[in-house]
Amino acid sequence: MSEPYDYIIAGAGAAGLSLAYHLVQAGLHDRSILLLDRAPKTTNDRTWCFWEVGEGPFEGVVYRKWNRVWFHGEGISRRLELAPYAYKMIRGLDFYRFMYRWIAEQPNIAVRYGEISRIEEREEGVEVRLNGQTFKGRWAFSSLYQPLPQDPRYHYLLQHFKGWVVRAAAPVFDTEAATFMDFRVAQQGAVRFGYVLPFDARTALVEYTLFSAELLPPEAYDAELRAYLGSVLGLDRYETLEAEFGIIPMTDAPFPRRPSPHVMNIGMAGGRTKASTGYTFQRIQAQSRRIAHALRQTGQPFYPEPAFSRHAFMDSVLLNVLEKQRCSGKQVFSDLFRQNPPQRVLRFLDEETGWLEDLQIMASVEIPTFVRATLEVVGRRLGQPKRG
Ligand SMILES: Cc1cc2nc3c(=O)[nH]c(=O)nc-3n(C[C@H](O)[C@H](O)[C@H](O)COP(=O)(O)OP(=O)(O)OC[C@H]3O[C@@H](n4cnc5c(N)ncnc54)[C@H](O)[C@@H]3O)c2cc1C
């Protein structure tokens, strides 16, 4: 392949690999693509969960899926039927291996490994430096994450979690249902919950998750996870097969989408993480499809985005409620699942609900609390942070 490449994809994680895949699926197999990353991925560094109706593009690597989930909260302990949705789980390593096999069959995709030190705008394109070597491209897509500077108009929480794949001495897990959120853990001034992804009756990925501004000391996650396994799930005898730790930013601050004319930020770096939940994987797929469509239709990747999104605004209000601890996250999520069919909640989190369903969702939470949070969000956006 000769330079300039049509597309340079800086970062070959979930977003970079998905973008390459969707570009080719959209019929752009005559365009040259260069994928760059530090190194090929050889470990199962993360697990992606998401919900979906029917089969998705990566159905072949879905490790487990469940048609129902448990929700344990304030005044609710319910096994929820999700149809037509299924809750699905993809192991990171399965996804990477699937993509590497697929890439090996694509004559228009080249891959190079090393440290990316610069992505620079040039006349009519970009230059990307990798281990001192320069690659020229017409467009660059970057998933190299840069933390945002703090701005008082926005909210900054972290979703942080530790998970173990455990094998229990006896069959204990409900293989028919994952546990979506389990609030039967002490909240200690943050949003804290466990969740369980059962592989079979004895094996499951069990996670302990927090939404808060500060991380815990590393050993605290292990202690909380052990306590959740023991006192909530009643599991004392198990072996730990794998561990996973993650931090996902939950913020309504805008991520730069177009840092320079020929560069587009994608994935988490491009603001694809849903601020109120941390779910990103499906939003990466949606973004990749839209970029591929825009490139086909207009020759450039920047598809139009609305200046105001009602759902993004509602995310800000929820972040404000949680950040200010106006009421507990346990209460909010319990109200949502107690008073709405789960399908409506999932559609809402997918930002696919209309006004009527949004009103039904809003009517299920503590209205005065959310009105106060809304007023503060508006005040902060106007540049007048309000206290209280
Ligand atoms: C442990 C964990 C579990 C998660 N679980 C879920 C989930 O269940 N559901 C969900 O929807 N979301 C989940 N997420 C959030 C999100 O889906 C993932 O973080 C996802 O991997 C984000 O994709 P990305 O491509 O933006 O970033 P990444 O996948 O992190 O990819 C960025 C890539 O850039 C490369 N890179 C960075 N800097 C450089 C450099 N200077 N030079 C070369 N290469 C570089 C990295 O090596 C990496 O491969 C999870 C995140 C984590 C961390």
Image: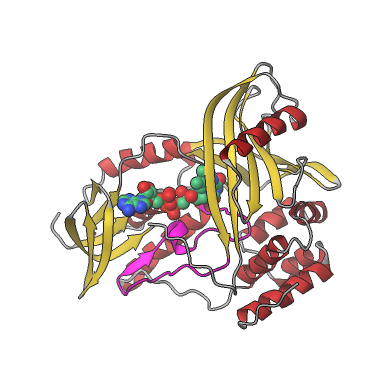
From where the camera sits, is residue 14 visible? no
Give the residue displayed 53% in from the left and 78% down from the top. 307
Q: Nearer the viewer, residue 117 or 200?
A: 117
Look at the image and give the residue range highlighted in magenta.
252-280
Place residue 265 in its image quadrant. bottom left
Magenta segment, prevailing SS (helix, strand or loop): loop
Residue 160 in picture, x, y percent from top left: 58, 47
Place residue 154 in its image quadrant. bottom right
The number of discs equals 0
From where the camera sits, is residue 241 visible? yes
Q: Which residue ends up furthest to the right in the rendered image?
A: 75
Note whether 262 is above or below 33 in the view shown. below
Q: Quadrant of the C terminus?
A: bottom right
Q: Nearer the viewer, residue 221 or 184?
A: 221
Q: How is the image coloured?
A: secondary structure
Q: Nearer the viewer, residue 33 or 297?
A: 33
Give the residue displayed 26% in from the left and 42% down from the top. 105
Give the residue displayed 42% in from the left and 36% down from the top. 93
Residue 228 in picture, x, y percent from top left: 71, 33
Decide if residue 300 is on the left or right side of residue 91.
left
Residue 259 in picture, x, y percent from top left: 37, 71
Q: Is residue 269 magenta?
A: yes
Note whether 41 is above or below 170 in the view shown. below
Decide if residue 274 is on the left or right side of residue 230.
left
Q: Which residue ends up furthest to the left in the rendered image?
A: 2
Decide if residue 110 is on the left or right side of residue 286.
left
Q: Quadrant of the N terminus?
A: bottom left
